Image: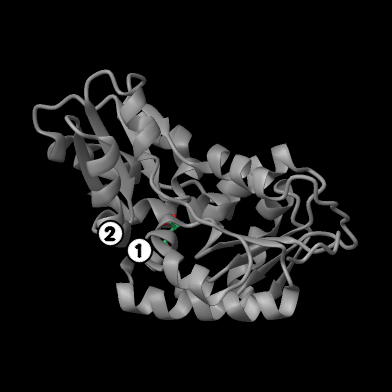
Amino acid sequence: MNTDPSSPLLLFDSGVGGLSVLAEIRRLMPDAPVIYAADTAALPYGEKTEEQIAARVPALLGRLVERYRPRLITIACNTASTIALPAVREALDLPIVGTVPAIKPAAALTRAGAIGLLGTAATIRQAYVDNLEHEFAQGKQLIRYAAPALVAAAEAKLRGETPDPAIFAEAAQGLRDRAGNHEIDTVVLACTHFPLVEAELGHALGQNVQFVHGAAGIARRVAHLTKGQEFLRKSPDSALFTGKEEDVDDLLPALRQYGIDHIDRI
Ligand code: DGL
């Protein structure tokens, strides 16, 4: 294992979604050097095939590991984790923390017994989700709804734009239509982009609905796996993007709020 104190934690997502996870990691581990990597050239992952994601994610992370020697990788993306986590663990010899839909805590919280799950189209069709449902939500209704427009809304919000409220109203209505007679009281935000628009979603779904996502649990896991390790930030934290520079420049003000000082290209 890499124990160089300046070795970073690498967080990976298709876009800005992983910042919702980074916020929790910062809270627990303010001294940890971080590299935030986003595959913006391939955003959105949720509209890709399993084959595309399974081919792309391990290869890209392999390149980043060679170049930046992180001590640990957090795949801060449900889509990439539910599809490619085993392949990444197989390919890379360092601790990998994944992000999986928070069905277990949601099942413990729901009183009505009906849980909504908002994710990308790719995430909600994964066997990984079927298995979590089977294991943790027996006797409960899990109502899945793909809401790709929320990914674009979160990206827009972090660029300083105001997303159209109709996007959130549509996601809320889509979930309710699927729920039929069931009264959803708990919604799993099964895409790391969605906590970034939690307030807007809360407004659309109403105050009787509570949201659950995995960011705090992921941060605890990262802290646990790096317990006792020394951290030294030698240079300001940076973000790496695969997409065009002009497409990401306007994200810098938002990135600064997450302690990211500058953007580089992968
Ligand atoms: N943030 C990603 C997730 O957690 C996916 C967004 C996308 O690229 O579609 O699933």
Quadrant of the image where one finds ligand 1: bottom left
Residue at 25%, 35% (x, y): give it: 137
Secondary element at tag 1: helix
The amino acid type found where label 1 is placed reads Gly
Colouring: one colour
- Counting from the top left corner in percent of width and height, residue 233 is at 87, 57
Residue at 66%, 61% (x, y): give it: 72
Residue at 79%, 56% (x, y): give it: 33
83 to the left or right of 184: right
Per the rendering, the mark at residue 121 is 2
Q: Does residue 242 appear anywhere in the picture?
A: no
Label 2 near label 1: C-beta < 8 Å? yes
Per the rendering, the mark at residue 46 is 1
The quadrant holding residue 232 is bottom right
Per the rendering, the mark at residue 216 is none
Compared to 224, does 207 lie above or below? Answer: above
Secondary element at tag 2: helix
Q: Is mark 1 within 8 Å of ligand 1?
A: yes
The amino acid type found where label 2 is placed reads Ala
